[in-house]
Image (cartoon, grey):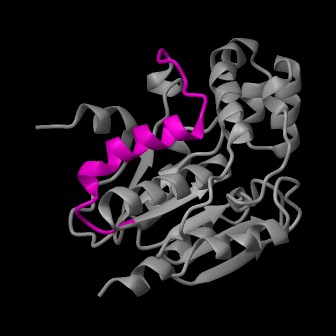
Amino acid sequence: MSNPAENLWIRRFHSEPNSRVTLVCFPHAGGSASFYYPVSDALQSAVQVVALQYPGRQDRRQEQPLTTIGELADASFAALRPLMDRPLAFFGHSMGATLAYEVAARMRTGLGSGPVTLFASGRRAPSRHRVETVHQRDDEGIVTELKTLSGTDTRILGDLELLRMILPAIRSDYTAAETYRWQPAPPLACPIVALVGDTDPKVSLDEAEAWGEHTTGGFELRTFPGGHFYLAQHQRAVINLISDQLLSLTP
């Protein structure tokens, strides 16, 4: 019998039933599962890729968005629970990296296990806090932030009707990301690979390096030329990094 939560939250673009590991992708603030279609397309012959679809966007647009990382993590964990009988790896960008970490922490606490690797992209370590207030701005202020980070299709930013539909979800995501406070907890046991653009205004190299404090399983920092959405310009390099890491972990 299918899991209703899984059906709501999980998107599969390709099927790779013989894969030894499933890569779970966590979108950024305002992002959707479709952001990771190219990753699934590129890895489909070797890795099963699934992406989370948060409430309030695309086919879940009529649902109320969640406004805390805790709520998102609890719901994500519940949706992913049926997949946790096989090896999982997590990839999260920006807010998605924080969410991936929190789901991994719930796996450790609830199941005594965790992902085989956590890829944390474009996000400072959970223990590194900044005061940020984008979620308190008016709609124009949020659009200005999106333009600055270049993470949203510029055609959408110029379409008022589309903006009206997506801004509630974007504001909710920013609220979740900016009000998040890490609660001291034992480190994870899995390797963490932090990825960051070298001119990202949202995370310094020191803040990215601090991800190493959150695991006993090994840490690597990889930098790329570019800003917060460096991965748009370095998609192939990022996909190769993911593939090399995961294939090295599986027999």
Q: Residue at x 88, y 25 (%)?
A: 141
Q: Using the image, determine if residue 186 lies above or below residue 163.
A: below
Q: Nearer the viewer, residue 74 or 192?
A: 74
**Residue 119 location, quadrant:** bottom right
Residue 123 among those drawn in magenta: no
Which quadrant would the N terminus be assigned to in this image?
A: top left
Q: Position of residue 99 (x, y in %)?
A: 56, 49
Residue 67 among those drawn in magenta: yes
**Residue 235 location, quadrant:** bottom right
Give the left or right position of residue 214, taking residue 134 as reference. Answer: left
Q: Position of residue 130 (x, y in %)?
A: 84, 49
**Residue 49 location, quadrant:** bottom left
Q: Position of residue 241 (x, y in %)?
A: 57, 76
- What residue range appears in magenta? 62-88
Q: Residue at x 47, y 61 (%)?
A: 90
Is residue 250 visible to the viewer in this orientation of the structure? Answer: yes
Q: Residue at x 76, y 14 (%)?
A: 160
Is residue 152 visible to the viewer in this orientation of the structure? Answer: no
Q: Position of residue 85 (x, y in %)?
A: 22, 62
